[in-house]
Amino acid sequence: MTDPLLDIRDFRLHFDTFDGEHKALDGINIQVARGETVGIVGETGCGKSITAKSVLRLLPSPPARVVSGEIRFQGRDLLTLPEAEIRRIRGIDIAMIFQDPMTYLNPVFTVGQQLVDVILSHQAAGPSADRLNRRAARDKAVALLESVRIPHADVQIDSYPHQLSGGMRQRVLIAMALSGSPSLLIADEPTTALDVTIQAQILQLIADLVDEFHLAVLMISHDLGVVARLCRRVVVMYAGNVVEDAPTAEIFEHPKHPYTQRLLQAIPHLHADVQHLSGITGSIPNLLDPPPGCRFHPRCGQAMPVCARMKPVFGDVAPGHGAACHLYGEGA
Amino acid sequence: MLLEVQDLKKHFTVKRGLFDRGHLRAVDGVDLALAPGEACGLVGESGSGKSTVARLVLRLLTPTAGRILFDGDDIGGLEERDLAGLRERMQMVFQDPHSALNPRMTVFRSIAEPLVIHRRLGGLELRRQVEELLEIVGLSRQFMYRFPHELSGGQKQRVCIARAVALRPKLLVLDEPTSALDVSVQAQILEFLTDLRERLGLTYLFISHNLAVIRYVCDRVAVMYLGRIVEEGDTATVFEQPKHPYTQALLSSVPLPQAEQPDDAIILEGDIPSPIDVPPGCPFHTRCPQKIGPICETARPTLAPDATGRKIACHLYQEGTRPR
């Protein structure tokens, strides 16, 4: 593989709290190539959103503290860039959309005003020669709203957020994200707050935009179905670790890590009568004091003595398919 | 039938301007019947009225029109003071177990409360019954004097279920009971709920937007759209051969957690209309990919059974409209 667009290497992040160090990310490695769609899945507290926010340096520090590792984007380490530099990347080269679109729109301005502001502020970061005036920025805003398939964009641009439905608001946020012509779109649960028929529309839209704008997407979701529909590769996280990373078809047909296997067995099926669903016994570990060795071993049905002593090394278990589990380690 | 709902309606008055009053038709003519021991699912998207139906059945709301027959009694018109007796026989489990439990009450007090209020229990007998309930929901006795913040989401939901079954109700209304939980915990609770229904002979009215969850728990399913039931029948039949265009689109919209994705997914255009301005005729005609003509815009299709007993409200399948 050539140089990935985004390369998260051995990234370790802790939160300093009154109760001690919350070891949120325990040395994760994730790569996203140009134009690739990658999904990160996992349950509450696995660190998927923290990973996404770390890329854009959106976490307040303190309490967040980078312990080690780097996050390289187009070859530059985002973690060491000065704030002025990261502002030229944030929202421009890397854009992000979130779960609840209403929270990210200002209720007292029209979507047009907000979109124009974003366009103008992006320009302030770029070369001064090709700056647009407000009118030209508005035309660009209409074009952006059209590109996210908002009907009657020239009229809807003057709507206030409350006048739009949830699906339309998410489209507005996607339009905003596209305004800087990003090469990477980070989508943190973008359809979780939406109804299923609207979710289908938004997923289709993101898939179209990936083709149209040659976007790379890092999609965060707890819903394996959403990731299956949109992503070519899936990264499974558990308690601050990447436990498995494989092409989408591989994850669903040949899951290797016991956690991935159990997670897939826990999902009720739409098109089959299942007699028994097996949950995963126990609950996610407290990351103030995570279990030693493999963080999944207290809940793992296939745990061996070594699992409590040593953290498994992430390695290839099949071509292009990696997992972090002692079952596949040397001597197992 | 344990529960029979006939032409149930609930309209809310909403302010649209200083003098402009609109009617929000949350539930607009719903018929539903539940046999004892059955698990019936209500699915639909936001604004479909599924939660309002649940609240009407429990008489947390008073219907605008229609009848609710429960266990032989017409409960639709009961006054507030007569409802206490009803609560013993039907109980509810809500979506967010965190806000459904009083943070200042121990698990013991939360579960004991219905027993104290309705059965006037106390002392050893109360303790014995609470212990038994904890055992039923699979929690050990050491949870008895813990507070909600010390429990995980799944454990809290088990406490809510223990409290709901404390009086041995006949009907349990579950409104999105696993939507706030992670899938691995959801699986435990769903498995447990299925088992509990058999053990205690309960009847479930199960509300969810998650179709796969409904498939796992329910024998029968009713699909709602804008305050009406558009299709109803045996869960497996409805899911494998959906007939109503909305049911077809809804099922096809669900992203499946599997390698192979269908490439013929039906993606509906537009948004769900507001329940304040419900389109005339069939409420789905504004988005329907199989609209047959002006009749869809003018005549409201009735929920009619086909030869197998499945009910569909669509002009495609109605006699005299078009032979099928």
Image (cartoon, coloured by chain):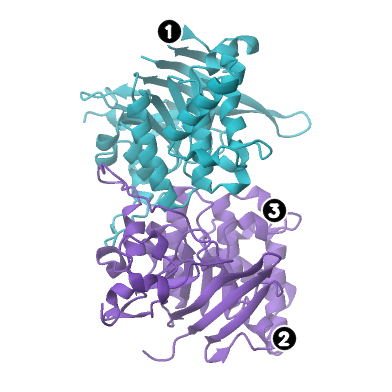
Chain colours: A purple, B cyan
Residue B31 showing in the rendered view: yes
Three-letter amino acid code at the position of disc 2? Ala
* 3D distance between C-alphas at marks 3 and 1: 50 Å
Which of the two marks, 1 or 2, is nearer to us in this view?
Answer: 1
Chain to which the residue tagged by mark 2 belongs: A
Which of the two marks, 3 or 1, is nearer to us in this view?
Answer: 1
Viewer-side residue, B86 vs A121: B86
Three-letter amino acid code at the position of disc 3? Tyr
Q: Do tag 3 and tag 1 residues touch (Cβ < 8 Å)?
A: no
* 3D distance between C-alphas at marks 1 and 2: 72 Å
Q: Do tag 2 and tag 3 residues touch (Cβ < 8 Å)?
A: no
**What residue is drawn where x is 41% and y is 17%?**
B3
Where does residue B226 sit, x and y in percent of width and height?
49, 33
Q: Which residue is mark 3?
A: A160
Where does residue B246 sit, x and y in percent of width and height?
38, 40
**What residue is drawn where x is 34% and y is 27%?**
B199
Q: Which residue is mark 1?
A: B72
Callout 3: few (<14), some (14-19), or many (20+) C-alpha neighbours within 10 Å? some
Chain to which the residue tagged by mark 3 belongs: A
Q: Does residue B134 lie above or below B155 as drawn?
A: above
Where does residue B320 sit, x and y in percent of width and height?
27, 22
Occupied quadrant, residue A293: bottom left
Q: Which residue is mark 2?
A: A84
